[in-house]
Image (cartoon, grey):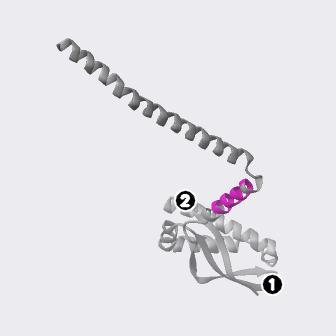
Amino acid sequence: MAKEEDLKLEGAETEEAKPAGKKKLIIIIALVVLILAGGGGAAAFFLLGGEDEAEGAEGEEAVAEEVVEEPPIPAQYVVLKPEFVVSFQVGTRQRFVQASIEVMTRAQSVVDAMELHSPMIRNEVIRIISMQDFNSLRTAEGRVALQQELKNAMIKIMEREAGSDNVEAVLFTNFVMQ
């Protein structure tokens, strides 16, 4: 009798397992069909999609990149006070140049170093201006060359004294010749 119960139990399990196995098989097939349909739809969307949409997306990315490129640190201006007055002997006449100068930088270390070493900077500015030809300073090209020479001198001083060469520009806010 034990043998008959064992046989019936084995047979009963296989009969109950068949409907459950069919359900699992149907669910798996349905999932595979859904995945394939979704993949085909996505492929059709990307392959058959308009080029205008793709160009529009690229243009939006370019605009987003341009916004990010703004300088993170605002410019700081160091005013070299008082104004510089340098005299020139031109022929038999005494001539003067008065210049108000500001230095543009984005590094706080340069601002601090310029305030600390202002006597050295003032001396170098006066030396450079006094070496210029008075008649060449009357032209725009002469003033631009003087600005560049002053900028290079400031960069050398800041490299030596502050370890930073972040001097971006030397600006004349007032330049009078007489």
Task: Please state if 131 lies on the left or on the right of 1 as rendered.
Answer: right
Residue behind mark 2: 159
Relative depth, front residue between 57 and 122: 57
Any mark on residue 43, and which? Answer: none
Relative depth, front residue between 68 and 142: 68
Residue 49 magenta: no
Quadrant of the snapshot with the N terminus:
top left
Residue interval drawn in magenta = 54-65
Residue 61 magenta: yes
Choose top left, top right, bottom left or bottom right for residue 145.
bottom right
Any mark on residue 92, and which? Answer: 1
Choose top left, top right, bottom left or bottom right for residue 138.
bottom right
Q: Position of residue 18 (x, y in %)?
A: 39, 26
Of badges 2 and 1, the one in the foreground is 2
Of the residues shown, which amino acid type is indicated by label 2?
Glu
Of the residues shown, which amino acid type is indicated by label 1?
Thr
Q: Position of residue 163 (x, y in %)?
A: 50, 58
Quadrant of the snapshot with the C terminus:
bottom right
**Residue ID at (70%, 70%):** 147
